Image: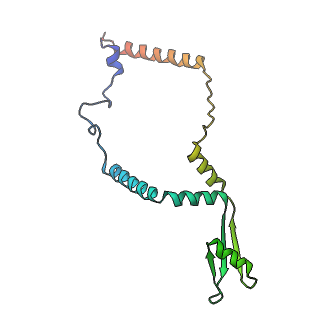
Amino acid sequence: MPALFDILKSSHGGRRPGAGEPKGYRAPQTIAKLEARELARQLITAKLQPLIDAQIEHAIGIQHFFLRDETTQQFIRITNPKEIERALNQKSKHYWIFTKDPSVQAFTDLMNRALDKPAEQVEVDVTVHTDQITARLLAGRERLAQEIETRKPN
């Protein structure tokens, strides 16, 4: 009579000795991705201060001051505060101020990076239907007993 374990264990799949890649193996695609990630990290870290400043400006709201060039009639962006003040004091100059609204997403991202992301509330429904589980277990045991009975040699 075959043991219960032998009936349950079939020859479909399972662990085989020596199968699979050796421990610690990395595919070439994974190595390329890691190298690219490291390169991106180095480039971003090198320019971290201007990037953070730009993100803060974006969170506050971005303002640009454009002054019309008298010779070309094109607007030129002015970043020097002293030049902006001088242009505002001259009545004949044409200027344009462009303001972009503050970004809530940029503010949230900065806060998450500076103060850690707040923990998300997770609701877990732990409703247990013991009657259904018991019925399924009993049905499985009956099927197993029938299988053992049919495989018994006469």
User: As drawn, is 154 to the left or to the right of 90?
Assistant: left
Name above or below for residue 42 compared with residue 139. below
Choose between 22 and 131: the one closer to the eye: 22
Q: Quadrant of the N terminus?
A: top left
Q: Residue at x 69, y 79 (%)?
A: 87
User: As drawn, is 19 to the left or to the right of 60?
Assistant: left
Choose between 87 and 151: the one closer to the eye: 87
Name above or below for residue 62 compared with residue 2. below
Q: How was this image coloured?
A: rainbow
Extreme-bottom residue of the structure: 71
> What is the total number of numbered labels drawn onto the structure image?
0
Percent position of residue 105, x then y: 63, 53
Percent position of residue 74, x then y: 63, 84
Q: Residue at x 51, y 58 (%)?
A: 49
Q: Quadrant of residue 67?
A: bottom right
Extreme-right residue of the structure: 91
Choose between 148 and 83: the one closer to the eye: 83
Q: Quadrant of residue 65?
A: bottom right
Percent position of residue 13, x then y: 32, 31
Name above or below for residue 120 compared with residue 50. above
User: As drawn, is 20 to the left or to the right of 73?
Assistant: left
Percent position of residue 112, x then y: 59, 46
Choose between 139 and 47: the one closer to the eye: 47
Q: Quadrant of residue 75?
A: bottom right
Extreme-top residue of the structure: 154
Q: Residue at x 63, y 49 (%)?
A: 108
Q: Quadrant of the C terminus?
A: top left
